[in-house]
Amino acid sequence: MSLASLPLFVRLGGRPVILLGEGEPADAKRRLLDRAGAHVVGEEAEAALAIVAIEEEEEAQAAIARLKARGILVNAVDRPAACDFTLPAIVERGPVIVAIGTGGVSAGLAAALRQRLETLLPAGLGALAEGLYAARAALRARFPDGAERRRAIGAALSPGGALDPLVKDSDVADWLASAERPAANVAAFVLASPDPDDLTLRQARALAAADRVYHRADVPPAILDRARADAVRIESEALPMEPGEGQIVDLTMDARA
């Protein structure tokens, strides 16, 4: 399954961004750019990004064409077909930023999802992120192997784990003082459906944590896409006798699916 857009987080502090238009749509974009530390400029300035918040259609299309002719990436308010990039709804907890985008198809849906997430994510989530950042050296010392370190952190951050991000007052130092080496694990699943939305919670969690995913040829790409982006995917007729260390997932499709 291809991505309609590739989500990116761009550091705009002190960088110029062109903003065209007047009224509330333009004001809303200006507030967002100000929060990101961007330097808002006019059309004649040199910039890599531009936002067109002009209501009149002919004027807006002319501005979009001029900007794109200069190689500038354009966000056109209320004109998703003309957008090179879109601006997502945002949930912010310090350095943790959750962005919800619909490719410009439905800003209302993105806003509704943001409101739901606002109630789920605790205020201390940013402090947890900063604690993990501050503990980088200590984490490397306790878990020198990078894959093992990732698994230990993943286990701690999992539901019910010592650093469960949806539970308040998690303390990285307390966890690290007693953190143990994560055990290797092999999880084998027979999938009842080719639809990724039919994955059980256990299957989805295993895929999200897997280091390697062994799978038969008929397992759909949409299922494999639910694994971590850097998990190794290996097409194999059977799970090897020695699949390796770490978190291993073996996927087989039910013949009746």
Image (cartoon, helix red, strand yellow):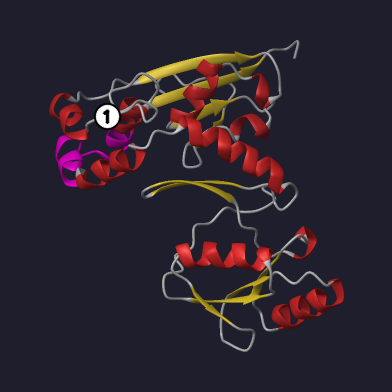
The x and y percentages for residue 96 are 40, 46
Q: Quadrant of the C terminus?
A: top right
Looking at the rendering, which quadrant does residue 74 occupy?
A: bottom right
Q: Is residue 13 magenta?
A: no
Amino acid residing under circle 1: Asp
Q: Which residues are magenta?
A: 137-150
Q: Judge whether residue 1 can be spotted in this image.
A: no
Q: Quadrant of the N terminus?
A: top right
187 up-or-down from 140: above or below: above
Task: Characterize the local packing of mark 1: few (<14), some (14-19) or many (20 or more) Cα atoms within 10 angstroms.
Answer: some
Q: At 46% across and 68% down in the image, what residue appears?
A: 12
The x and y percentages for residue 139 are 20, 39
The x and y percentages for residue 173 are 16, 34
29 up-or-down from 43: above or below: above
Q: Residue furthest right?
A: 58
What element does badge 1 sit on? Answer: loop
126 up-or-down from 222: above or below: below
16 up-or-down from 211: above or below: below
Most common SS among magenta residues: helix
Q: Is residue 139 magenta?
A: yes
Q: In the visual, does 168 lie left or right of 105?
A: left
Q: Residue furthest bottom?
A: 44
Of residues 163 and 236, the one nearer the viewer is 163
Of residues 124 and 75, the one nearer the viewer is 124
Of residues 236 and 5, the one nearer the viewer is 5
Q: At 22% across and 25% down in the image, what residue appears?
A: 181
Residue position for label 1 = 169
Q: Judge whether residue 220 can be spotted in this image.
A: yes
